[in-house]
């Protein structure tokens, strides 16, 4: 009989132990789920703290691209306005200048007007932005220069005839070009015309004799060189 009750007691203890072990598993499972939720929340907070621009570098590139200035749609101020800007900045009247020239030019892909003139013993050289009209650079030289303009009597050939000679040599018509420089000058005592114009992406430079209209010098190059 004692053995019978001892067996029942032993069986009861085993069942109690198994029940206790089984009751711990749900607790551990619940705790693991809570820990996973906590880690997931921390990960979400970390992700939300990352700036949008860092997550998408293309947005920063786009923003940078929109800041680049573009002359599209803008209108050139023209040679006359560029000339007046340079004269006003120098405080010089056009009537007091000699060898005044305005040249349409490109520098590092930027369109500008190169304005040069002499007043008294001073040489002035300006670069004027072709769209905004602002002074990009300015140089003033006072090195004992004594201007000696070519006398009108030396110019047996007219300016129009010199321009026509340059156009014929280039194989172009006047309506196909934009003149950037046309002036009467003197080089080594010889009166000549400096004729420059642009057609498409090519710039042409001529020196035409003011005495007989012959071509003294001719150069052609891309405006991007």
Image (spheres, grey):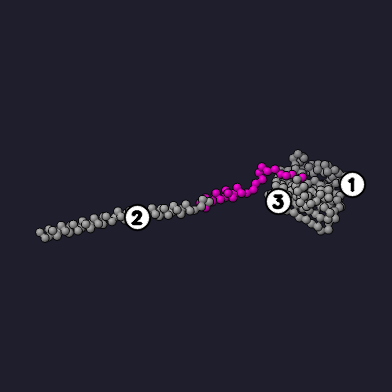
Circle 2: element type: helix
- For the residues marked 3 and 2, what is the alpha-carbon distance in whole angstroms? 69 Å
Look at mark 2 in the image and give the residue it sits on: 32
- For the residues marked 3 and 1, what is the alpha-carbon distance in whole angstroms? 37 Å
Look at mark 1 in the image and give the residue it sits on: 153
- 3 and 2 marks in contact (CB < 8 Å): no
- 1 and 2 marks in contact (CB < 8 Å): no
Residue 107's label in the rendered image is: 3
Q: Is residue 206 visible?
A: no
Q: Quadrant of the N terminus?
A: bottom left
Residue at x 14% of width, y 60% of height = 6
> Which residue range is magenta in the image?
54-80
Mark before the other along the chain sequence, 3 or 2 = 2
Q: In front: 67, or 172?
A: 67
- For the residues marked 1 and 2, what is the alpha-carbon distance in whole angstroms? 106 Å
Magenta highlight on residue 61: yes
């Amino acid at each position: 009989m004692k053995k019978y009750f001892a067996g029942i007691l032993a069986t009861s203890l085993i069942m109690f132990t198994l029940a206790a072990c089984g009751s711990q598993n749900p607790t551990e499972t619940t705790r693991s789920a809570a820990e996973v939720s906590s880690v997931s929340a921390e990960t979400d907070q970390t992700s939300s703290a990352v700036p949008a621009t860092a997550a998408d570098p293309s947005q920063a590139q786009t923003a940078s691209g929109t800041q680049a200035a573009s002359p599209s749609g803008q209108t050139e101020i023209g040679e006359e306005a560029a000339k007046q800007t340079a004269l006003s900045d120098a405080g010089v009247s056009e009537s007091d200048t000699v060898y005044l020239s305005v040249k349409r030019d490109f520098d590092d892909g930027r369109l500008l007007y190169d304005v040069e003139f002499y007043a008294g013993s001073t040489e002035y050289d300006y670069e004027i932005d072709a769209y905004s009209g602002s002074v990009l650079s300015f140089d003033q030289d006072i090195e004992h220069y004594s201007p000696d303009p070519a006398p009108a009597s030396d110019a047996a050939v007219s300016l129009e005839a010199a321009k026509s000679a340059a156009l014929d040599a280039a194989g172009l018509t006047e309506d196909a070009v934009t003149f950037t420089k046309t002036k009467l000058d003197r080089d080594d005592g010889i009166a000549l015309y400096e004729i420059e114009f642009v057609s498409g992406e090519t710039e042409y430079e001529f020196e035409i004799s003011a005495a007989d209209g012959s071509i003294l010098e001719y150069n052609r190059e891309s405006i991007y060189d």
